[in-house]
Amino acid sequence: MRNLNNELEDFLEHLRVERGLSHNTITAYKHDIHCFVLFLNKKSFKVNWDKIKHDYISKYLFQIMKDGLSDSTRARRLASLKTFFSFLLEANIINIDPTEDIKSPRNISKLPEVMSEDDINKLFDFVFSNKTKEGYRDFAMLELLYATGMRVSELVDLKLNDIDLNSQRIRCMGKGSKERILPIHENSKIVLDNYIHKYRPEFTKLRNEKNLFLNRLGKKLSRQGFWFILKTYAVKLNLKNKLYPHVFRHSFATHLLHGGASLRHVQVLLGHASITTTQIYTHLTDDHLRDEFHRAHPRSS
């Protein structure tokens, strides 16, 4: 049976590998969540993530305000809890996010970082210029991440039989073992077809190796392995502050909304349990809509 530490460690690993956060930032998240757990323990509440309700969060925020913590510290503590419970919700560990309707002491929320289309094209062009088996593998992985919005953990877990090139669909196992079928466009189909039939066999001759993306030893590529590959490209292209695994997921969602996709459509593609998780991307498109308005309106100076 899994315990509380399992969920917390999974969350911290998600922050490190999927979101590419620094050691200090992850330590801060861990500290903030431990402070909340200590508060619950003092209240003789047996901590069980799916039993935590809205009022426990409110009482905790009230207590740390009484303790004299600043608005900024309380806002950070709440932001950490919101991120953690959002992770638990997506993983089907909880059914309701107890932090959903709780407002921050400071009305400031950090929006997901998104790569511009120019930066994505710059990265893709650079990776594609690496005419090796590793280069073609990397290009296929990045193409698939941006084309589908899947998580890196989902990407490295793909098996050969999850790919249906004829119907241009991919079967993806998300958090909580939730399956979803993702469409891919023609370019992605061509890139995947090329990798699977021409370059993947150079990694291994074993027919019983079912994993789609392999390392140099012919074994399954790990999340850590993917992160190392991405960091290498980030350094070479001077994109160190822009390039981390989850940025492709953020960019996929934002660019789809820019292109006119519905919020519900994007929610299904991302595999979000709640549409409120997806709504964060609408804030990113607000600036785009304002810029387009000022560019296009005849009375805009």
Image (cartoon, rainbow, N blue to C red):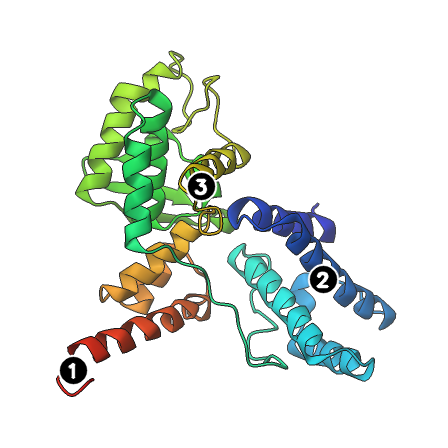
Disc 2 + disc 3, Cβ < 8 Å: no
Q: Which residue is pictured at 39% across the width and 67% down the height? A: 281
Q: What label does residue 253 carry, if any?
A: none
Left or right: residue 47 compared with residue 281? right
Q: Position of residue 5 (x, y in %)?
A: 73, 50
Q: Position of residue 245 (x, y in %)?
A: 46, 46
Local SS, label 3: helix
Compared to residue 116, the image places residue 46 above or below, namely: below
The single residue placed furthest to the left in the displayed view is 298
Q: Which residue is pictured at 65% across the width and 75% down the height? A: 75
What residue is pinned by disc 2?
33
Task: Give the residue type that dot 1 points to.
Answer: His
Left or right: residue 13 compared with residue 1? left
**Cα separation between marks 2 and 1:** 47 Å
**Cα separation between marks 2 and 3:** 31 Å
What residue is pinned by disc 3?
234
Q: Quadrant of residue 33?
A: bottom right
Compared to residue 269, the image places residue 102 above or below, namely: below
The crowd level at tag 2 (other Cα within 10 Å; few <14, some 14-19, many 20+) is some
Local SS, label 1: loop
What residue is pinned by disc 1?
297
Q: Earlier in the sequence, mark 2 or mark 1?
A: 2
Q: Which residue is pictured at 75% across the width and 76% down the height? A: 60
Task: Give the residue type that dot 2 points to.
Answer: Ile
The crowd level at tag 1 (other Cα within 10 Å; few <14, some 14-19, many 20+) is few
